[in-house]
Amino acid sequence: MSENSAEVQEAPKYFERLNISAVGIERVKKLIKNTIKNTINCWNDGRDLEKQTFHIIGPAGVGKTEICKQITDELSEELSVRFDCMIIKAPVLSRDDYLIPYPVVDNGTRKFEMLYSDFVPSGDDTYGIYVIDECGRGDANFQQLMWQIQNEYKVHLRDLPKGWFVVAVDNPDDPEYMMDIVDDAAGLRRMLHVYAEVNAQDFLEYAIKMNFHPAVIEFIQAHPQHLYDFKSQKLGSVYANPASWERVSNILWGVDPNGDGSVKNHLLDVEDLAAGLVNTSMTRLFIDFLKNLTIINPKDVFFNYASVRKNVLEYVNNGNNAKLSELMVGFCTYLMSSKPDRTSKTDRNVVEFLTDIPVDTAAMFITETDKYDRNSEAFLYVTNIHLDLINRSKKYKNEFYDRIIEVAEKDKR
């Protein structure tokens, strides 16, 4: 390998260096919640299972801290016990915020005892998650105290209640972040590490559940690649991320409280405000989407394909494969996140759309679906559409499904 080619190679990402799993934020939540629940169930069955200390690593704004709150809410309901969530912000705390020695006299002998703060959970029969947020940005003395909590489940000589589980939350130790993470063997062995990667499907399911403004939901459904702007982040600019899109949603609800499209009367205000959250370049794309400028909305493909078919065929005739691929990703994302009610008309629209576009692009209807957990509602929803149309539509079977099989067989040869 030449010296120049070696220079252009990107350094491995933090999760690659650690050699750990990288999964969507919902998957992270499920893994941690079920591990805690299984541990408590083992205790109740008489097996004194050791607790895991979890370390969630992921880009800023992906929802790492938020899922800890969700886990405690869900565990409270599923285990019928109160689960608290205590979140400690490491960059703004010090060791002295936790314990202070004070003098006492015991049988005429002077000694020091420790005064513990409210940051240390108490109560033998209590349950909770102790979240150490941005531990890698705390000072060295504070990190040492946190290491004791993560490794020994105690602060100085005081044990944390048995029902409390520790979750450390960090940004990756990549150039975009100012981190001071100690990657020695002792530090790595203390925790179960998992990387939370950006996942548009997880964001959209959360956005729909939390009633984000429909304009934000539909924009990310149409353009899932705009959920997180890694390029702007690397340049040190304001960048789009799941948390910033939630704030944009709040702005839109403020000017369009009924969600009836009156946001179009406030585009100048929205543009200036949103630019401070997702940057000016991303905001221009978003404003163009709100104005509906030459953009094919995946929702229209499903419900009213006739209204956008001319634009789709224009992409096809011009050989604009990039736009067609982007539309297919958006279409699949829309179906799997919204799971809209089907009718005979919407099924016909799906057939017409998939048979209008080139087979290699249309095949993304299968390949995009195949990326999801086979037990998920999203996977089952799209799979049911596929199986129903194979059985009920000759056009779908002959011009879509059989064409895909034919191309796949040729590739094998």
Image (spheres, helix red, strand yellow):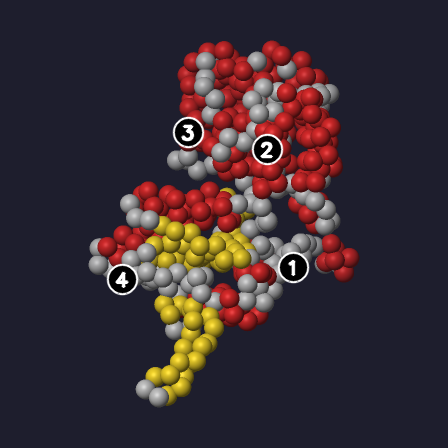
- First of labels 4, 3 by sequence position: 4
**Residue type marked 4:** Asp
Q: Residues within 10 Å of mark 3 (few under 14, many from 20)?
A: some
Q: Residues within 10 Å of mark 2 (few under 14, many from 20)?
A: many
Q: Residue at x 61, y 24 (%)?
A: 256
Q: Rounded to the nearest whole Å, what is the CA distance between mark 4 and mark 2?
A: 46 Å
Q: Residue under circle 3?
A: 380
Label 1 secondary element: loop
**Residue type marked 2:** Ser
- First of labels 4, 2 by sequence position: 4
- First of labels 4, 1 by sequence position: 4
**Residue type marked 3:** Leu
Give the image quarter of residue 156: bottom left
**Residue 29 located left or right of residue 162:** right
Q: Residue furthest right?
A: 4
Q: Rounded to the nearest whole Å, what is the CA distance between mark 4 and mark 3?
A: 38 Å
**Marks 3 and 2 close (CB-CB < 8 Å):** no
Label 2 secondary element: helix
Residue 12 vertical position relative to residue 240 in the rendered view, above or below: below
Per the rendering, the mark at residue 178 is: 1
Q: Residue at x 49, y 34 (%)?
A: 210
- First of labels 2, 1 by sequence position: 1
Q: Please identify the quadrant where the C terminus is shown.
A: top right
Q: Residue under circle 4?
A: 48
Q: Rounded to the nearest whole Å, what is the CA distance between mark 4 and mark 1?
A: 39 Å
Q: Residue at x 36, y 61 (%)?
A: 122
Q: Please identify the quadrant where the N terminus is shown.
A: bottom right
Q: Residue under circle 2?
A: 249
Give 281 or 95, whichever is nearer the viewer: 95
Residue 9 vertical position relative to residue 390 in the rendered view, above or below: below
